[in-house]
Image (tube, rainbow, N blue to C red):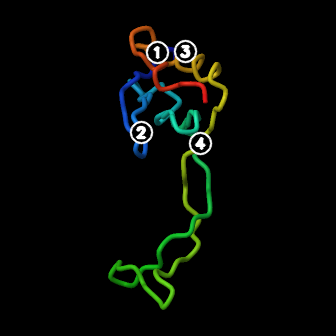
């Protein structure tokens, strides 16, 4: 699992940042992304779980049903990937060094300014 990801430049909402994307099937993560506005590293694992989400109610044609207060919603149980949130920047750096094959050449620190 070492070096099973690569660092790439990315955008998150309106900020420039970086992502880790898998380079092989042995990687335990779908992707990782750093949120520079909150200094939180989001890890999306391949572990799946059931979660309840509110989704738009659809008619028989797949069109969202609207009411007097906007789009109607209903609760559904769906399968989602488990997410982990890492706030400790030293831990983020350790994860990057462990998984990213280009950790020594990619300047990820520019996005990890202490706030």
Q: Say whether disc 4 or disc 2 marks the residue closer to the N-terminus.
A: 2
Residue 101, given in percent of the width and then of the height, sits at 43, 14
The CA span between labels 3 and 1 is: 7 Å
Return the mark for residue 15: 2
Q: Secondary structure at mark 4?
A: strand
State the residue position of label 3: 98
Q: Say whether disc 1 or disc 4 marks the residue closer to the N-terminus.
A: 1
State the residue position of label 1: 3
Mark toward the viewer: 4 or 2: 2
Residue 96, given in percent of the width and then of the height, sits at 52, 19
Quarter of image, res 40: top right
Q: Say whether disc 3 or disc 4 marks the residue closer to the N-terminus.
A: 4
- Give the residue displayed 59% in from the left and 42% down from the top: 83
The CA span between labels 3 and 2 is: 25 Å
Quarter of image, res 6: top left
- Give the residue displayed 47% in from the left and 83% down from the top: 70
Crowding near the residue tagged with mark 4, few <14, some 14–19, many ≥20 C-alpha atoms within 10 Å: some
Q: Say whether disc 2 or disc 1 marks the residue closer to the N-terminus.
A: 1
- Give the residue displayed 36% in from the left and 28% down from the top: 9
């Amino acid at each position: 699992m070492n070096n099973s990801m690569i660092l790439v430049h990315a955008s998150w909402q309106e900020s420039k940042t970086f992502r880790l994307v898998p380079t092989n099937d042995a990687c335990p993560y779908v992707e990782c992304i750093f949120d520079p506005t909150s200094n939180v590293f989001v890890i999306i694992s391949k572990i799946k779980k059931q979660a309840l989400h509110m989704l738009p109610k659809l008619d028989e044609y797949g069109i969202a049903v609207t009411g007097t207060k906007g789009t109607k919603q209903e609760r559904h149980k769906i399968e989602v990937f488990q997410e982990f949130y890492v706030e400790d920047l030293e831990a983020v750096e350790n994860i990057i060094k462990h998984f990213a094959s280009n950790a020594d050449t990619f300047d990820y620190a520019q996005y990890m300014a202490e706030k």
